[in-house]
Amino acid sequence: MLLPGPRLAKRIIDVGLSLIGGLLLLPFLALIAILIKLDSPGPVLYGHTRIGQNGRRFKAWKFRSMVKDADKVLKEYLEKHPELREEWERDQKLRSDPRVTRIGRILRQTSLDELPQLWNVLRGEMSLVGPRPIVQDEVIKYGEKFALYIKVKPGMTGLWQVSGRNDTTYQERVNLDIYYIRNWSLWLDLYILARTVWVVLTRKGAY
């Protein structure tokens, strides 16, 4: 999808900013890890299989924001609250998710839980900016657009994150991903990165 020259430029920006940001944030990352351990039992990091460029699967890393046995907790919660099942099946999210820990809620609202994905960027599995990394169950929602989706690397941030996040419908998320891929430029990436800082500070569309 990207020509060799722009693709190389995008990769240089990814590696440079990830290295600089990762080194500067090391003390802060260590503090987050300590808070997670103090808040609830379980590992500090959580790896979840996502679909990357050319359909390759990889582990996208995040700070753990959920309790242990999260899948079991979700199943039991939806059984007790069947009226919320439609919300979950539609968005793959719940506004009041019982699995999320106290520290996890703060990390999610500020997107700090995604900072470990800097490692995925350095490994070349993700980019700083790109479409949302999705799981296998979400492929059907992309339909014919999935073939275009896998032309590029998923991103830590993207148009969805700076365009309302959870205030948008799933179809709007898909359309934003496809618009980004079709209209990519370095200037668009720089705009999204700058806009991401503002969105994180204001917590717009976060829950």
Image (cartoon, grey):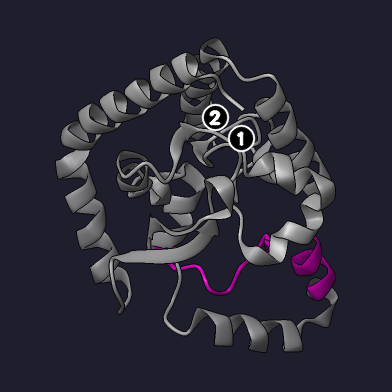
Q: Which amino acid, mark 1?
A: Lys
Number of the label disc, if any, that sits on residue 199: 2
Q: Is 195 in front, or is 77?
A: 195
Q: Quadrant of residue 43?
A: bottom left
Q: CA distance from mark 1 to mark 2?
A: 5 Å
Q: Mark 1 sits on what residue?
A: 204
Check if residue 92 falls in the magenta segment. Answer: yes
Q: Is 148 in front, or is 190?
A: 148
Start-end of magenta stretch: 85-102
Question: Do the numbered discs 1 and 2 sit on residues whose CB atoms are within 8 Å?
Answer: yes
Q: Can you say whether 146 is above or below 196 in the image?
A: below
Image location (x, y in percent) of residue 13: 35, 21
Considering only order in the chain, which callout, 2 or 1, is on the residue closer to the N terminus?
2
Q: Which amino acid, mark 2?
A: Val
Can I make out residue 167 in this image? Answer: no
Q: Is 185 in front, or is 41?
A: 185
Check if residue 62 falls in the magenta segment. Answer: no
Quick one: SS at disc 1? loop
Along the horizontal axis of the image, is 195 left or right of 145? left
Quick one: SS at disc 2? helix
